[in-house]
Amino acid sequence: MNFSLTRTSLIAEADLIGIAGERAVCDPRGVLYFPELKLLAVSDLHLEKGSSFARRGALIPPYDTGATLLRLQAVISDYQPSIVISLGDSFHDGGGAERMHASFRERLEALMAGRQWFWVAGNHDPEAPADLPGETVRELAIGALVFRHEPSKVRVEGEIAGHLHPCARIVQRGRSVRRRCFAGDGGRMIMPAFGAYTGSLNVLDRAYAGLFRLETLMAYMLGAERIFAISHPMLRPG
Amino acid sequence: MTVEPRLADQNAAVALPEPFVRWFGEKGWSPRAHQIELLARAQAGQSVLLIAPTGAGKTLAGFLPSLTELAVRPKRKPGQAHRGIHTLYISPLKALAVDIERNLGKPVEEIGLPISIETRTGDTPSHKRQRQKLVPPDILLTTPEQLALLIAAPDARRFFEELRYVVLDELHSLVTSKRGHLLALGLARLRNYVPDLQTIGLSATVAEPDELRRWLVSQNPPKGLAAPDMAGLITVAGGAKPDISILDSRERVPWSGHSARYAIPEIYEAIKKHRTTILFVNTRSQAEMLFQELWRANEDSLPIALHHGSLDVGQRRRVEKAMGENALRAIVATSTLDLGIDWGDVDLVVHVGAPKGASRLAQRIGRANHRMDEPSKAILIPANRFEVLECRAALDANYLGAQDTPPLINGALDVLSQHVLGVACGAPFDADLLFEEIRGAAPYAALERDTFDRVIDFVATGGYALQNYERYARIRKTKDGLWRVSNPRVAQQYRLNVGTIVEMPELNVRYVRQGRGMAGRGGPVLGKIEEYFAETLRPGDNFLFAGKVLRFEGIRESECVVSNGAGANIIVPSYAGGKFPLSTYLADQVRGMLADPDRWQALPEQVADWLRIQKDKSVLPKRGDLLVETFPRGNRHYMVAYPFEGRLAHQTLGMLLTRRLERANARPLGFVATDYSLAVWALDDMAALFKARKPSLAALFDEDMLGDDLEAWLNDSWMLKRTFRNCAVIAGLIEKRFPGQEKSGRQVTVSADLIYDVLRSHEPDHILLQATRTDASSGLLDVSRLADMLSRVRGRIMHKHLDQISPLAVPIMLEIGKESVNGGANETLLMEAADLVEEAMGPGRGQGQQGLT
């Protein structure tokens, strides 16, 4: 295979996992990076979720958009991707982009500048975000990979999806640890939600039924500094 | 004044209307002096605090002013509007309200009084509540939460405008919590409706009666209204002295642990010798364990029952009923039975484990022989050697009549936020007037205007520096200067979230027939169990609950499915709440006893002997000193300190000491804390560090640890997150979780932990974070107590270096490994799990390459 890693300090050979023949890094901050393609995928940003709740009377702090963008800024400046794919539910609702505070909009646009940016349509944000650059698509095929928001019911090799907000739980020495995770079986991958206010759903929940080959299913749980790869038999529901 | 519990003479009974005098006569009773005294003061317009032991006729005393007044009130003529409530009775427990309805109904009926008495609790059906609004009873028995709801209703002022008395039962237990804050604010609102409202507080003995006396009246009466700043006080001296003993066991008292298993045969003998025994324990897990052990010893099949807060309500009611009918010989109970519900002929109270506070002990012992003039009989069963000291100290304190109820704290801001929204739901308010009203509530007497304004801001738009939410405001100031609810949905949301008790998420425990597994349906619900405990179970695990060994089958929606279990490896659920720390007063007593060998004679010989050997091999600290021992063991170095300040303060101290030792390169590995002491272990020789003054022991224990170190640690602490969740729910920022909307809702709702993280990094001074820190310092962290201790021992730390472990250190050394410290170790657990995968599957499978062909 012929490729060069742009940021060798970040990516060790052993950190790469395979998805339908392509190689990617599961970053513990919750993004997926394909070094050969210089492509960064991030899912379920749910920007403006705070203000979406506020509209309905729950006045939770309005800082989630800022917090999410700061974290996104950090990974983008580390990997310097040429292509960024936001895998749907980028905004918590259709009016999110309009409600966004001007300072956040500026920050987002600065992040987008000089890169190819795709907004994959999600169930929360089926339409293109108002007044923002970038191309809105239903799904996107690049090489052997297909990027779409909701995982298909039938198995699709090379599908990268979001939507389900996977997390995994283990019990070790009588104590339970639950973390967001990437879930993959070597053929498809479901990404963790990236947004500051996004919750998560256990990969053993019935919503995932039939999506994975259980014998090769791994949960790549997000740690503070690294990913912890946990195989299916060690996972617990709930 | 203090009133003797003798019977009043005929002259005193003058204040009683004739039908009452006749009723007392028919019963062969005379009204008690304090009952008459209270009636006379109430008739003179005074609010009164009545402090009396159980069995002194407190309830009747509290209601006499209302009953006598209602007895002579002219009847409502047909066509006249229905009258509002005359008397409001508020108790901390629903069960107590129901109990009072029965107890009060009897004299009312026998005297033939035209008085209607009704309860209103969370269990009251909605049609009855509706009817109560239209046709209010004369006397309404209810809880603080229901009062908050009544106030938040648009017709509140009319409903309460004829209110004369508020009777507050078990006031000592209400005032120390956030429920007490909510109630105090409710009272302030009632005083706004009825400025000359009178309150009658009923309380067990407390350390500072004046605090309760202030609580009962407005601390900020309207100008021109001459009102005393304290309620009157009537104290009834305690009844017969209780007969309390500490079990002097034939068996060896263990060094550590809480099960008191060693004493089971002796406890069983005691049960057999008495009519009815109540066995009090401190936690629900102890209750489960003791119950199990007693049945194992129960060769005579005596009817022994179990009662604790996690059991199904129906189950609890059956036990209470059996108790009232004297059908039980023994009942194992937790604090759910602490309060003054009156039933059964209990002739023995057994307290298993140390009582943790002298007042709590007195209250619990009061349950035996619920008649004031007969002595109560109680046996204390210490579970380990330190508890022997604690029991002895508690016992001395009880004879001295010493009290150690916790000090009252300033009113919480989350509760205030809830109340402000509630007031707005009831009627538009003027901020200036509301501020004056709220300052009348004792817990908020010192509230500053600036803080109050921030609370209003929070209620309106969240109070964020980034003012994004103006258009979503819940309350708005209109042109007339009044604050109003911006739409009816706000009031609906408020009603669903009212109250200050935030439960840990719980699952129903559903029983199915064995062998059916998860397919089994329709069995009874045995009670509730904390979600986090259920999540650590594996199908097939056996655990103890509701007095049964159960087999865990799995979690189905909001239910934990179980069947009959068996086997040796039985897990006992540990419950988050219910662990009381050792009270400050009792801690001081224990230290005093340690320092004074003359007092050891009162201790069982094996315990006295333990202390003598300690004195011989190490040293015993003086009463005000702090002993710190260091010794090597295995390839580690240990430091054990004995502050006796309770588990919570010790845990905080342990966290902070470990941080400092880490900075001093002592390479600390961990710590463990009990009510009495804490132990830290490290790879390096800490004694050598102290000797070289790097740092000195005095510097290590310096009070400045409560500055930056505390702040830094706090921010990441799970305790702060849990506290924040509670504050956020009470303040109405996030909604309460209701059964059934669990789990699947996880992606949709925003978890409090995430909100906490975001808010902390973007607006660390937000009012809700301020409230959270205040709560944590007095609650889970017990910082104030730690601060008091550190300042007390300044210059009085006694270091003893030893070659080996001392006798006093044995109990805490045995705790090591039993209880892990919940801290930043989660990553380590993940690493272990990931390594296991790697080990089992071979390298490469764990961390990469997988699927690559």
Image (tube, helix red, strand yellow):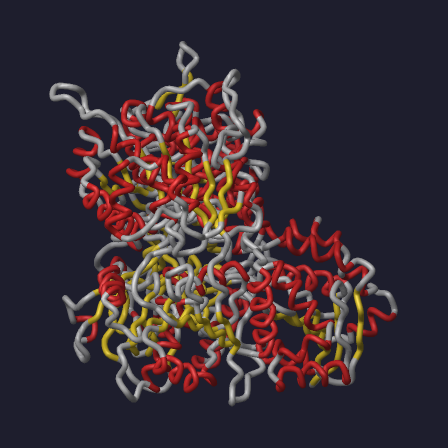
Relative to B592, B838 lies left or right: left
Q: Residue at x 47, y 25 (%)?
A: B437
Relative to B619, A40 lies left or right: left
Q: Residue at x 40, y 20 (%)?
A: B429
Q: Residue at x 37, y 46 (%)?
A: A87
Relative to A224, say whether B31 is above or below: above
Residue B380 at x, y percent in the picture? 49, 74
Residue A234 at x, y percent in the picture? 39, 73
- Would residue B235 be visible to someone looking at this image? yes
| Viewer-proximal residue among B16 and B138 | B16
Q: In the image as oriented, which residue stretches furthest toward the right?
A: B692
- Would residue A112 be visible to someone looking at this image? no
Residue B272 at x, y percent in the picture? 34, 82
Relative to A197, say whether B462 is above or below: above
Residue B208 at x, y percent in the picture? 57, 46
The quarter of the picture where residue A231 lies is bottom left
Relative to B486, say whether B268 is above or below: below
| Viewer-proximal residue among B141 and B637 | B141
| Viewer-proximal residue among B732 and A140 | B732
